[in-house]
Amino acid sequence: MTTATLPTVFGDRHAGFAGLIDHADEQDGIRGWILRIHQPNRPVQWCLMAGDDAILSGLADAVRQDISAALGREARCTLHIAWTQLTARAFGTIARLPPSAKLRLILVETGEEVQWAVPRPTVGWLSRAVERCGRPEEGAEARAIPSAPPGLPSSRDFESRGLAADGRSAIPAPPAGRITDDAGAGSASDLRAVTPAGRVATTVPASYVVEGREGRPEVGIAFEHLFVVDGTLCAAGWMIGAETVEFRIGEDLAPPSLIVVLDRPDVASGYGIPAERARGFVAVWLAPRPPAILFATAGSDLQASLGLRPFSDGAERQATDLLRAHPAFAAAVLRGARAHPAWLRLAAGVLQETPEEFKEARGFIEQAKAVPNIGGMLIGWSFHVPPCEVVVLTDDGVMRSLDEASRWTRDDITAGFGAEFGAFTYDAGYLVALHAPVRATGRVCLVAIVETGAYVIARAAWETAPADAVSFARWAFELPTPAYTFSDRLAAHDAPLIERLIKRRNEGLRYARSDVLAFGQPNPDPHCSLIIPVYGRYDFARHQLLSFAEDAFIRSKCEIVYVLDDPRLADAFVGEADAFVRLYDVPFRIVVGSVNRGFSGATNLGARLGAAPRLLLLNSDVIPLAAGWLERMCETLDGSETVGAVGARLLYPNGSLQHEGMDFEWEPQLDAYVNKHPGMGYPPDPVDCRPRRCEAVTGACLLIRRAEFEAVGMLDEEFLIGDFEDSDLCLKLRERGRDIVLFRDLVLVHLERQSLSLTGETLFRDRVVRYNAWRHQRRWGGLIARNQESERGSHA
Amino acid sequence: MRVLVVANAHPDHSVGGAEIAAYNLFQFLAAAPAVEAAMFLARTALKSIAPGSISARRPGEFLWRQDIGDWFTFSSAYPRAISDQLRTLLFRHRPDVIFVHHYLHLGIEILREFRRTLPDCTIIMTLHEFGAICNRQGQMLKADSNRLCFSESPEDCHLCFPERSAEDFWLRRLYIQKHLGVVDSFVAPSHFLRERYVAWGLAPERIDVIENGQPGRDALAPPRRSRSRGERTVTVGFFGQINPYKGLDVLLAAATALDAAVWRGLVLEVHGANLDEQSSSFRVRIDALRERLPETARLHWGGPYERTELAGRMARVDCVVVPSIWWENSPMVIQEAFACGKPVICSGIGGMAEKVRDGIDGLHFEVGNPLALAERLTQLVAEPDLLSRLAEGIIAPPTYAESGAAYIALADRVAQVRRTATTIAALV
């Protein structure tokens, strides 16, 4: 038999333990110490084992002077196992085991075994010791009270003194002797003779039953589970003679976030009492609380109170068992713990299909697509009979109620189920998005929640949704919800996903490669950089360069940066570029991006490369008709500090007006202000050569100071496919008090197709506009409304 | 004066009207006392010459391997050769005047290159057709129906070519006009063509009308066939390319409609090339029309001819028919007929109606209308004096020398204007 003389040390000084068992006495029990090295005043939980069976568990929580003196700090580390602590169940265990089995003492938190400085006792030794001290009565649990050995603090002392001294874990016990005489069930003295009230148990299951005359249980409380899972506390147990249970932490009432009261026929039969006198409970506290002793009290006049410290080992398994055993508890969790994915995940794991007779809800998932780490979207049909509720739940614990879904009436469902379910089948179509990360390899289900349980009414495996924002939108926007509810749907479902996809794409784009190719001798000190994104067609560049060739200001004082935002065209464009510079004698650069960045991204990329203090944002399909326009725009920008941006009149090729400043107009269909081009399509008014102020100008031709462009964060890159970036830019400038001005006598031709008007040529285009309008409105709705208000005020 | 004549082809390899006119002008200029040095640059497709290269043909004559990369905008397939080989040639020859006869096959960029490299030279460009205006090879016929097109616009052009947007057509026009913008003066061989270009956007004062020259009347016209052989037969000839636009089918359809009595006094001769190259539907149509001719019809199918054979063949006819269904500019066949003293029956539109005066040196008929043409043919047979009266009304077309002299006069005038402008600019 080996014995240790030095303490056992586990782990390091930051997260380790030390301990030694230095006394084992047939009368006195087992003594020693277990210390949490870095927090000596935080008691450590132990478990006494015989072979692989746990016999007893407890906290080593009394102050030990010698260790405290050695550490210079108060150390709550006294281990004392008195035989009186042993329960009937422990005796049963001991009886089963061979007498030669050795006892072991392990740390519950780590599973490490503490060494013995004395010969290690065996089960036989323990049996003899217990026989000598007297066994507890059969059938009772936790009635044994540890008796304080001489020289150690009494149990009463350690509860009141030891626990009060520590702010973290010390919980004063509730006042003792709360059992009153007037319960009518028996005399107080009889009851006291059984056991004092308000005990703190050290292990589960733990019960405290107050017996009346003839030993009949009058009131009782028991913990069968008490554990912490994902920062939440869960307790389960039963009570006798009470309909409710009251919880306290310290002296404070601690009502649980959710509680389910159940029948417990097993408890009733065990105690020989009528079934209605025994009730089970499962309760959860969702608000984060420090580990503490939880006291549960059953009964009102005659009370039974029991305290217990929560355990954390095996918590998930315990939670799963509870959820599986009590469908009503699973239902309560799904209703009450929506912000707690860990609970939802556990619940998702145990849910069953609907029972045969279940008539509260029907549903189906037609499409379920998810982008890993972003979220997912489902479409299908469901209906339910209130108060039943239907939710979407993933197996990783993401949940959303279908009450929040975008809904519409489906004739097929009404026809198929209307006879049986009537008006509940209206609005059966649903579209719902989950805005939390989901595993795309996982599964998702529709769950019907009723008071008594929660049942899966439909299941589906996630399919992978396009991870690119535009492709995702192309898929999602085609999902057939009614057009008139699209704006609401967008805000509640699609938009948060698309926003995240766009942000993620933009993060990726920061690392995308781009090459810069110079054609001709670049201007060393340019006055103005023309930033021209090219997408889809590069042949416009030929026409622009031909025009620039005839403009001395542009040729000699500016630099031209084409940003090829269409990698497919790289070879073709670059191949012709050399001929362009030879034929037109206008130097320029081409930035070849390796990916498509969109109008904003491409413009910003070009702007970062341009060297001049002024930037002209120019569309590749804007063709100047005469020389000198840019020089005048630059003069105007330079002429006044208050001018933030300068634009020009743009015409369609047929001579009708395309742009001379933008207004914001309320569009009820989109529930947003949108950009309007007043006079578009009409013959332009006669020109006057003074610059005039306007609400905003198009980004197709916009001059701005580089410093200011950078100060306002350049063009917004988070709109879905180019749109609204220009008005967004202008509003950013106006927010800084700048004016937006426009020349009506500077005329360029914009080849923008007239057919691509706001109404859109396809459903997809239309919905892209709605998305962008929604985003623009969220950001600028207030400023636009205020501007228009003050405009009206000044007119009045 | 140092001159450069640029043509879309060399007559050694191709016999289109434009290259013949250009080459004749070059030969005239090379011999003209006012000209110090003349150079002829013709585009070629000869495989023996590397793409973009310029190669000597004979003294003063050069071939340039060039082609079109984009027919929509007449952009060169070898643009580097413009800023390279062509630029070198311009620097070496340093012409004072460049007579450009086309941009087809050459690339319209050559115009800006002339101006860029030789800022002071006079650039005179002869417009031979409507290619700049109409993307349908300049036919100005509606794409689907072959209806006549009276004026272009980006929207109308888009209707003929739905695959190109109206904006594309706007850009095309702007692009071509910007290149034509460097030209000092244009020459139109007909007033009709001039007016179409003015309507399209060229300033009227920048376009002169100079008729293409012809070899002198003596050179072309053999002794006139005597009409006193006793028979009352009128011989009507068709000359030139055979393609859907030249209206041979109109002529054959008219022939099927003629009375047997008319055929007793009428012989038709068709001297045309390239029928084999036409679409099968067109060939089938021509064959079907020939099948439908009555037994009594006298049709002589002369087939292709060499240029040198033309005078001989034309001498055998009494009059020439030009039934084109498109506008024509200044058809060479009309000039040739007049040089041979033959009246012309033609469609009453465009360049044909301008060159042939109805009832004076020829007859007009409604374009594309076989019955109207049949009426004219019947009239010729029925009125024995008509042909000789019309023949007498013919005014000989200008000779190469006359035409060339007009070109030199125009160049002088333009140079004068440029000098004046420069002087004024210096004063201001």
Image (tube, coloured by chain):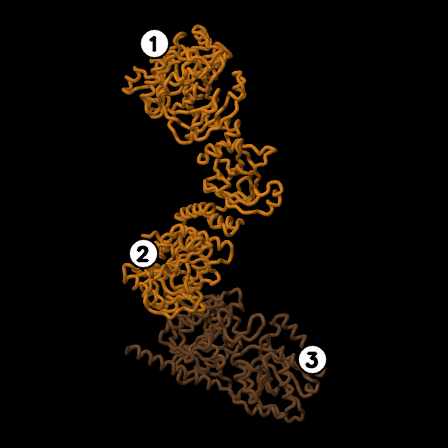
Give the label on residue A706, or none. 2
Q: Which chain is brown?
A: B
Instruction: Report how far apart the C-alphas of labels 3 and 2 lie in the structure.
Output: 80 Å
- Which of the pair A96/A514 is nearer the observer? A96
Position of residue A690 in the picture relative to residue A200 (left or right): left
Element assignment for label 2: helix
Instruction: Report how far apart the C-alphas of labels 1 and 3 lie in the structure.
Output: 143 Å
Q: Give the percent coordinates (x, y) of residue A601.
A: 40, 53
- Which of the pair A495/A607 is nearer the observer? A495
Dividing the picture into quarters, in which one does residue B388 lie? bottom right
Please state which amino acid type lies under the numbered disc 3. Leu
Instruction: Say yes or no: labels 1 and 2 on the same chain.
Output: yes
Instruction: Report how far apart the C-alphas of labels 1 and 2 lie in the structure.
Output: 85 Å
Please state which amino acid type lies under the numbered disc 2. Arg
* Parent chain of label 2: A
Dividing the picture into quarters, in which one does residue A56 lie? top left
* Parent chain of label 1: A
Please state which amino acid type lies under the numbered disc 1. Pro
Q: Give the percent coordinates (x, y) of residue A597.
A: 42, 52
Q: Give the percent coordinates (x, y) of residue B37.
A: 40, 80
**Residue at image coords 37%, 17%:** A176
Q: Give the percent coordinates (x, y) of residue A413.
A: 59, 44
Disc 1 or disc 2, which is closer to the eye?
1
Depicted A463 relative to depicted A272: above or below: below
The residue indicated by pointer 1 is A150
Give the label on residue B293, or none. 3
- Which of the pair A510/B273 is nearer the observer? A510
> What is the display colour for chain A?
orange
Position of residue B378 in the picture relative to residue B406 (left or right): right
- Is residue B60 visible in the rendered image? The answer is no
Instruction: Say yes or no: labels 1 and 3 on the same chain.
Output: no
